[in-house]
């Protein structure tokens, strides 16, 4: 059974940093794409970042470029390093797995992602 376990959320002051982790288990192929989405109350789920393991390319939404970094290791863990956090980053963060090729790493549409983690809450205080 494919499972995604997101962790690392918490409460941080504006300007601080957090590192989110997403552990992928039950998936036996080396190539895939993992994206991070976030959702705050009253807003639609928003794509934040994606990494395509087949070619190593990474993608970011404009609001996090230069502040967030996505990475993945050989154990199929994916990380989102978040620096210079501001209150607008407050949301529940979800990791999502795309398994069908070609991997699109589409940040504007959730339908390409077949599996989702349970979410981890990030709260940034001002």
Image (cartoon, rainbow, N blue to C red):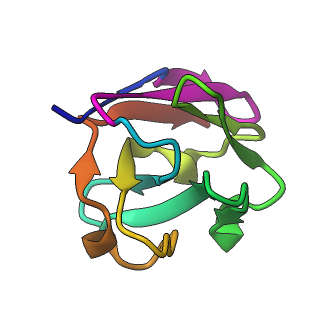
Q: Which residue is at the far right? A: 66
In the rendered structure, which segment of residues is drawn in magenta? 9-27
Residue 18 or residue 126, whichever sits in front:
18
Is 110 magenta? The answer is no
Residue 59 position in % (x across, y down): 67, 65
In the rendered view, tell whether residue 77 sits above or below residue 57: above
Left or right: 70 as drawn, with respect to 33:
right
Residue drawn at (69%, 58%) of the image: 64
Residue 17 or residue 14, whichever sits in front:
17
Residue 61 position in % (x across, y down): 63, 69
Left or right: 106 as drawn, with respect to 53:
left
Residue drawn at (64%, 26%) of the image: 18
Q: Quadrant of the N terminus?
A: top left
In the rendered view, tell whether residue 90 sits above or below residue 110: above
Left or right: 117 as drawn, with respect to 31:
left
Q: Quadrant of the C terminus?
A: top right
Residue 98 or residue 21, whichever sits in front:
98
Residue 80 position in % (x across, y down): 62, 38
């Amino acid at each position: 059974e494919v499972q995604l376990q997101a962790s690392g959320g918490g409460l941080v002051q504006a300007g601080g940093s957090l590192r989110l982790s997403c552990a992928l288990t039950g998936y036996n192929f080396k190539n895939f794409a993992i994206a991070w989405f976030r959702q705050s109350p009253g807003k639609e789920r928003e794509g934040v970042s994606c990494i395509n393991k087949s070619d190593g390319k990474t993608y970011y939404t404009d609001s996090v470029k230069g502040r967030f970094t996505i990475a993945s290791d050989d154990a199929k863990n994916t990380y989102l390093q978040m620096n210079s956090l501001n209150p607008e980053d407050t949301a529940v963060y979800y990791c999502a797995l795309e398994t069908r090729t070609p991997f699109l790493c589409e940040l504007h549409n959730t339908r390409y992602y077949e599996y989702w983690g349970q979410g981890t809450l990030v709260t940034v205080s001002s």
